[in-house]
Amino acid sequence: MSPSFNTERDGQALEAITDDIQEVNVLKAALKVKQGTATDEEINIYEKSQFDAEKDKAKFRMYEDACDRVKNFYREQHEKQTVAYNLKARNDFKSKTRAEMSIWEAMERLNTLIDESDPDTSLSQIEHLLQTAESIRKDRKPRWMQLTGLIHDLGKLLFFFDAQGQWDVVGDTFPVGCAFDKRIIYPDTFKNNPDYNHEIYGTKYGIYSPRCGLDNVMLSWGHDEYLYHVVKDQSTLPDEALAMIRYHSFYPWHAAGAYHDLMDEHDKKMLEAVKAFNPYDLYSKSDDVPKVEELKPYYLELIDEYFPNRVIKW
Ligand SMILES: O[C@H]1[C@H](O)[C@@H](O)[C@H](O)[C@@H](O)[C@H]1O
Ligand SMILES: [Fe+2]
Ligand SMILES: [Fe+2]
């Protein structure tokens, strides 16, 4: 007997199944250890890497010798990142979903962006993401850290949505609402920032207090902060991964030691994780160009492991 199709009935059944799948995914996400810090077996992220030792570090982040493109980028960013702008950006972020697509689609979408703030690479973003992930994988670090490497710059997608330019997407980050530290690159370019001489924002602690915790500090809006919020809500990645994403551009803090008096106990642990991540992000920029199609199957599986829903709300 041949099966008989009833479009309306079958359509409804399909809809019910899709709903069920979505519900199961939400439950799965809730059941997995949501956030919390990484487990003991994964803790070897702090072991110094072979990879880190092999690189000539003096060749990276040479901002004094950087081209005008980089210098002009930072001048503009340092003049425009104000408290008022940051409040507005966060408000805009919460008010809507900008796009719906998978992680891999987001990587492909990002590929046309050439980062104006970066003196070290002219490769495309998908290549930088794969270089970072592959260098973590070669060092046999945990799968969640490999995935963090793969996605850490996806927040640059912002450039295709509400950004005003690149100055509110890429580049190093720093707190707004308190004095700009001298250890931020090109510190003199803050002089024309309207907050520079502000009676509160221009003081050492500004709107913050000692040991208030970085969760309570507003870091200049850009790809880190944006992606952090997306990933926090839609993945099962641990706290260390979220910190690697949120603070990876906060060089004045993780590399130069500024703003440490704003940290709470939790931040001290997270700082170690961010430091462990940094060499892979920075020094993998000189590695061979990765073969995207060859690596794709491995990473698609890895993405599925920590993102219960294939389609992400961006
Ligand atoms: O130019 C780079 C680039 O934009 C990176 O994605 C960011 O994380 C760095 O902090 C910055 O120096
Ligand atoms: Fe970045
Ligand atoms: Fe990066």
Image (tube, rainbow, N blue to C red):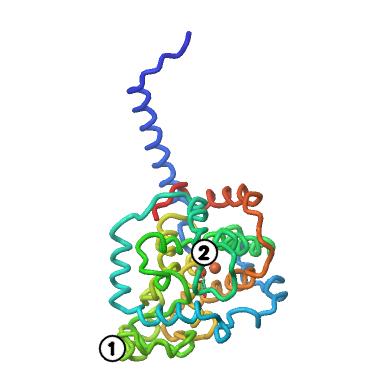
Q: What residue would you read off at disc 1? A: 200
Residue 42 percent location from the top left of the image: 61, 63
Which class describes the residues within 10 Å of circle 1: few (<14), some (14-19), or many (20+)? some
Whether residue 253 is visible to the viewer of this picture, yes or no, is no
* Image quarter of the C terminus: bottom left
Whether ligand 1 has any atom under 8 Å from the Cβ at mark 1 is answered as no
Q: Is residue 78 left or right of residue 198?
A: right
Residue at position x 28%, y 76% in the image: 84
Sequence-earlier tag: 1 or 2? 2
Q: Nearer the viewer, residue 43 or 231?
A: 231
Provide residue 97's location: percent of width, then percent of height.
34, 54
Q: Which mark is residue 314?
A: none
Task: Measure the C-alpha gap from mark 1 to mark 2.
Answer: 33 Å
Label 2 packing within 10 angstroms: few (<14), some (14-19), many (20+): many
Where ligand 3 lies, by quadrant? bottom right
| Viewer-nearest residue: 44 or 10 | 10
As drawn, 270 above or below 150 = below
Question: In which image quadrant can residue 220 be found?
Answer: bottom left
Ligand 3 within 8 Å of disc 2? The answer is: yes
Describe the element under mark 2 as helix, strand or loop: loop
Instruction: Indicate the quadrant where residue 74 lies.
Output: bottom left
In the drawing, what numbered circle is on residue 152?
2
**Tag 1's secondary structure?**
loop
Residue 308 in view of the camera: yes
Mark 1 in CB contact with mark 2 (< 8 angstroms): no
Residue type for callout 2: His
| Residue 44 vertical placement versus 212 (above, below) | above
